Image (tube, grey):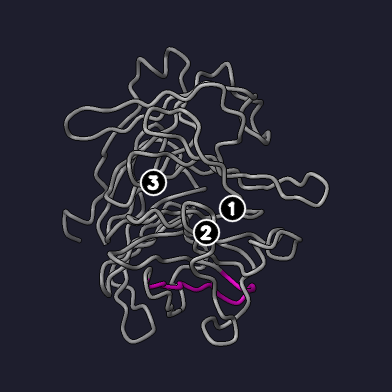
Amino acid sequence: MATSDRPVEVWRLPEEEWRAGRRAVTWTVGPDGELAVLVVPEQYLAPAGSWPPLRFPYDAEVVLPDRGGERRVPLTGVGCSPDHLALLPGGRLLLAECRAEQDGEEWQPNGFVHRPDGTPGRELRLGDDVRALVTDRNGRIWTAYGDEGIYGDHPMSFAGLRGADTHGRVVWSPDHRKELPGYPLEGLAGATEGRYAWLAWYPSSSGSYLTRIEETAGTSTTVPCPVRLPVGFAVRAREGVFLTSGGELTWHLLVGKQWKRTGKRQLDVPGDLDRERAYGRDGVLWFRSGNGWYRVEA
C-alpha cells in the first residue's frame, strides 16, 4: 500500500496542557480542512459516562491549529453540552447538543452559534437526537438523526436526514418514495466533497447507505455503504476510505453503484480511537486516537 495511505499525525494536545488538567472533549474539521478542538479544564468534567459530559456553566477554548501555529477562541459561561462542534463561514463556531428539550409544546434551541471572538450569537433549533452533523463552505448544516428523533415528536427530525441554513431553515430533506431505498433509522457519519454533502445512515439491520446531496440543486443519489457502521468516511470522485470502530481502514472504488474494496489496514497509532466521530473533507479522512489527530487519503 502506498505511503500516502498511511495516517499522518496533524496535531497533538500538548503534554503540558494535559498535565495542567486540560482535556479535549470534542472536535471537528471545517470544510477547508481546518481542525478545531474544544479544550476544557478538567474541573468542569462530569463523572465518566455521564450526560451531559460537563458541568454547566463551563469555560473552554476552541483551538484551531494550522501550519503557522494555532489560534485560540475563548468561550465563557457555556451552558450546552458539546456533543457536536462545527465551523461556519466568517470564523463562527457552532456548538450543538444531540438532544433537544421541550418547554411545554415548544422545542428549545439546541444549536448555539459563537462569533469569531467567542461571544454568543444566534441560537438554532436543529432537531432532536442529532447523530451526525457536518457543515459545508456555504454554512449549510447537514444532519442525520437517531431513531429517538426520527420516531419522536420533533418536526425537524422525522425525515431522518436534513440540510439547513444558518438560520435553521430547511434547504433539503429527502423524498423517501423517490430518493431513498428505505426509511432512515439511524444516522452514522457525514462528509463533504466539493459541492456535495454525504450522509451515512441505515434503515434496518440489513445494511447501510451513503446519500450524496448536490448542495445547491438539492438533488440526491444513494448507494450502499461498503462498511456497515462507519465511524467516518471520505470520498473523492469514485474513491473512498472508511474507518470502523474496531480501527480498520478500508479503501474502496465505486463501480456503478457498488463499492469494490481495494485495500485495508489496521490502525497502529497510539491511544484509544474516538469511536463517536471522524470527518471526511474532499477525500481526506480525519480521526482522533488518544490525544492525537490524524488524516488519511481516500
- Per the image, is 204 magenta? yes
Residue in front for this viewpoint, 94 or 28: 94
Locate residue 199, reporting x and y percent. 46, 65
Which residue: 40% across, 30% down? 62
Dot 1 lies on which element?
Answer: loop
Residue corresponding to mark 3: 88
| Type of the residue with mark 2 | Thr
- The C terminus is located in which quarter? bottom left
Lower sequence index among marks 2 and 1? 1
Height in image: 47 above or below 253?
above
Which x, y percent locates residue 230? 47, 60
**Which residue does the numbered mark 1 point to in the structure image?**
126
Distance (Cα) linking label 2 and label 1: 8 Å
Front tag of 2 and 1: 1
Relative to 237, 124 lies left or right: right
Of pointers 2 and 3, the one earlier in the residue sequence: 3
Q: Secondary structure at mark 3?
A: strand
Q: Which residues are magenta?
A: 202-214
Along the line of sight, which residue is nearer the eye, 289 or 93?
A: 93
Decide if residue 11 is on the left or right side of residue 140: left
Q: CA distance from mark 1 to mark 3?
A: 15 Å
- Tell me the amino acid under the disc marked 3: Leu
Within 10 Å of disc 1 (Cα), the crowding (few <14, some 14-19, many 20+) is many
Does the magenta stretch mainly form a helix, a strand or a loop? strand
- Identify which amino acid the numbered label 1 is placed on: Leu
- Disc 2 target residue: 143
The location of residue 70, given as percent across then percent down, is 26, 28
- Tell me, yes or no, whether the two marked residues, 2 and 1, touch with CB atoms within 8 Å: yes
Residue 49 vertical placement versus 225 (above, below): above
